[in-house]
Image (spheres, grey):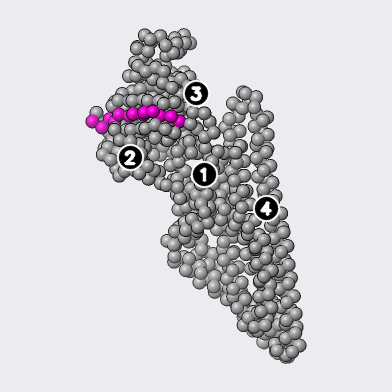
Amino acid sequence: MSGSILPIASRGETVALAWTLLRAQRAPLAIATGAFAASGALGLVPPWVLGDLVDVVRDGGSTADVLTGAAVIAVAALAGALCAGLAVAALGQAVVPALARLREEVVARVLGLEPDRIEEAGTGDVLSRVGDDVRTVTTALDEAVPYTVESSVAIAFTAVGLAALDWRLGLAGLCAIPFYVLGLRWYLPRSAPLYREERIAQGERAEALLTGVHSAPTLRAIGYEEEWQEQIAARSWRAATVSITVFRMLTRFYARTNRAELVGLLLVLGTGFVLVRADAVTVGAATTAALFFHRLFGPIGGVLTTFDQVQSAGASLARLAGLALLPEPDDAGGAVAAEPGAERGPSASATPASRPALVLEGVRHRYADGDEVLHDVTLRVGPGERVALVGATGAGKSTLALIAAGHLIPSAGTRTLDGTAYETWGGGVRARVALVTQQVHVFAGTVRDNLTLAAPAADDPALHDALKRTGALGWVAALPDGLDTVVGAHGRTLTPAQAQQLALARVVLADRPVVVLDEATAEAGSSGARQLDAAAAEVLEGRTALVVAHRLSQAEAADRVVVLDHGTVIEDGTHAELLARGGQYATLWASWTQV
């Protein structure tokens, strides 16, 4: 199970957020309310007219009376259907934009989460929220919510119509309410926790499946695939068990609903019989009352049947609201307004005066439920200096790089950029520090789209210059449509080296004064290594840089080399100085040059 799932909003927070999203759509909501009311009122016409027809026939009425009544019923049914359609359409106009805005806010918060927070919660929890929970809420808004509103209006109007026939018939129908309430009182306390548990179990199942898929080669290499399959099976069975428990609960709830319907109908029929015998009401009125109450079966059953969807959607909405209510990324740590040189584009050019110094002091870090991976690390990178991080796998290089880039908050220690604490910069850190890792994603779209993510206003000459500086202009020009060639999903597949060149070109376009490369050229292979190293050197020219070196040729080209071992800095100096010392770096260099 994940160490700590992402926050889930309370009922009050969820309702407040929903109203905040909906109140901007007041006109469609007003139209929907009026149309639902008209549809509910028109729904009373058929049973009322049928009751009158019973009396007409009993009293020897004419065929014309019957045909007139049938025509009224047909017109009322058609008008009611039109009003219901208008209501659903207007409700859609209100809730669809609100849901779209909620999705945007959720995605924005997820993109702004620190990597360690996502790792702590588990990617399965995140994906189940932006996938399963969004789908659940969407389905409820498309189906359950309109039906629930329409049914609720119908119930209210029918209850008024029943009382209008005769107060005693209305009272008989009301006697069924306690039985419905008893069913709800049994259902409500059990449903919300179960639906929440179901969502959490689904998230844990997704986490296990994703981990198994992504880590399959490693699991096979260490012979742990069967044990992991058992974990997947256990989490899948837990999710299935919770779903089975939900289904059993619903079955028992429906039985209680049927009991309330039986009691209510018997009471209305019995009261009608007594009143007709006493000549207090006509047979037609008693018939109308029975039809009114029978008409309630559909709306009440609809409300109660879709109530589980509404409850389920409420649980999903609370999970989405938990993300949407997270602080905005730029607000974390008290972001400051645009600092000079913090903007995108040419105004952030890495001139000597704007190249900041990067200082990490006394940094420690521990991942959730794990050992400390960094121990009291102090690192200083001067203005325009290029520092290479070297060390064995697991030494803490990538963790330190993420902390330096502002993508990971250390457990302890201080970080300053150009003499200002990261907490003061807030979101401004990421506006000044570019991070490129070995896991580069090629976005579905054109080459141009992949580049202008970093600089939306960049023109073709700027794009060509960035591609030229990273050695990518040749192969991009050779593509069928050049910059407008579709790549990524449903498009042309790029090699790892080409994907890295696009990522480095984005760094050129973004023009950040500080760059952190976390083994950004590791996936190139031996054939493209020199080309990518040259591209990286071009990108880093004139910038403050921290490079996690996958190949020691990158360390050789750096101004300074820092060697990490088990989360501790053990050597710090130039390439030549460290070779002269004959320490761990010298040993690594000797091994590397002999390969």
Toward the viewer: 76 or 110?
A: 110
Q: Which amino acid does label 1 sit on?
A: Leu
Q: Residue 246 carries which label?
A: 4
Q: Is residue 387 left or right of residue 73?
A: left
Sequence-earlier tag: 4 or 3: 4
Q: Does the magenta stretch include residue 520?
A: no
Res. 543 image quadrant: top left
> Crowding near pointer 4: few (<14 within 10 Å), some, many (20+)?
some
Q: Residue 424 carries which label?
A: 2
Sequence-earlier tag: 3 or 1: 1
> Crowding near pointer 2: few (<14 within 10 Å), some, many (20+)?
some
Toward the viewer: 334 or 513?
A: 334
Q: Which amino acid does label 4 sit on?
A: Val
Q: What residue type is labelled 2?
A: Thr
Is disc 3 placed on a helix, strand or loop? loop
The residue that appears at 74% across and 87% down in the rendered structure is 276
Task: Give the spatial CA distance, label 4 vs label 1.
Answer: 24 Å
Residue at image mark 1: 6
Q: Where is residue 87 in the image (x, y as percent from the top left)?
A: 53, 67
Q: In this view, does 552 lie to the left or right of 340?
A: right
